[in-house]
Amino acid sequence: MSSTHGYTPNYFSISDILATEERISCQLEMPLPRLGFLDASSDSDDLKVGTKLEFPFWLAQSLHCRRRPVVSVEIPKFYKEGYREILEADASAVTLSKWSQHYYELGMLVRQFNHRDCERIIESLALTFRSRVRLIMDWAQNPMPDPTLAGQLPILERNLYISGRKSRELLIAWLKQGGGNIETSETVSNLLRKRKRAEFESKD
């Protein structure tokens, strides 16, 4: 994920592609003829103004971010003030993956809607990540890890946790192979000998 003020989805990132598939609640701002089949609760052939539908983010963005918006967008509830207050109280106690598997990525994307709370959402994302990242790395270094833990984390945290586990395994394997016996290189040894000789000669 890129920086908070310049985030754009990576065209080649499966995670970013899946994040844009997250569904967003929208309300029509203009009628759409012959698209009534999109609303299973309606018998009309057309979609009327005020109809509420859920669209994947990429479509909601396309319909909203234009000179005359086709839809208005409702920010997902888990980015609203009540949920932000829960995270502020104790972010480590929340199973973020139950809110969204792409909690961080989607949060960065919704700021494109210029909602009045967008900057607060970005601040909440940063604070949440900072408060959880050390805990995630502690879990990654645990010699007796919970096998279900990775599945409880949103994608960004899960990838970080898995990377931490792999790094720990590589370090252990390196130490078992004798990598812990680090020897001074010949170049450094020669420099040390020359320094000692120079110090000895200066005393004379």
Image: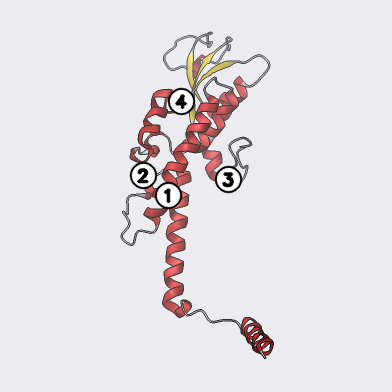
Q: Mark 1 sits on what residue?
A: 134
Q: Mark 3 sits on what residue?
A: 13
Helix, strand or loop under label 3: loop
- Per the rendering, the mark at residue 76 is 4
Q: Amino acid at mark 3?
A: Ser
Number of other residues with Cα within 10 Å of mark 3, as a class: few under 14, some 14 to 19, many 20 or more: few
Does residue 21 appear in the picture of this structure?
no
Residue depth check, mark 1 versus mark 2: number of the one nearer the observer? 1
Residue occupying the point 47% across, 15% down: 52
3D distance between C-alphas at marks 4 and 2 = 20 Å
3D distance between C-alphas at marks 3 and 4 = 23 Å
Q: Mark 2 sits on what residue?
A: 152
Q: Is residue 204 above or below residue 91?
A: below
Residue occupying the point 36% across, 33% down: 89
Q: Amino acid at mark 2?
A: Gln
Q: Amino acid at mark 4?
A: Pro
3D distance between C-alphas at marks 3 and 2 = 21 Å
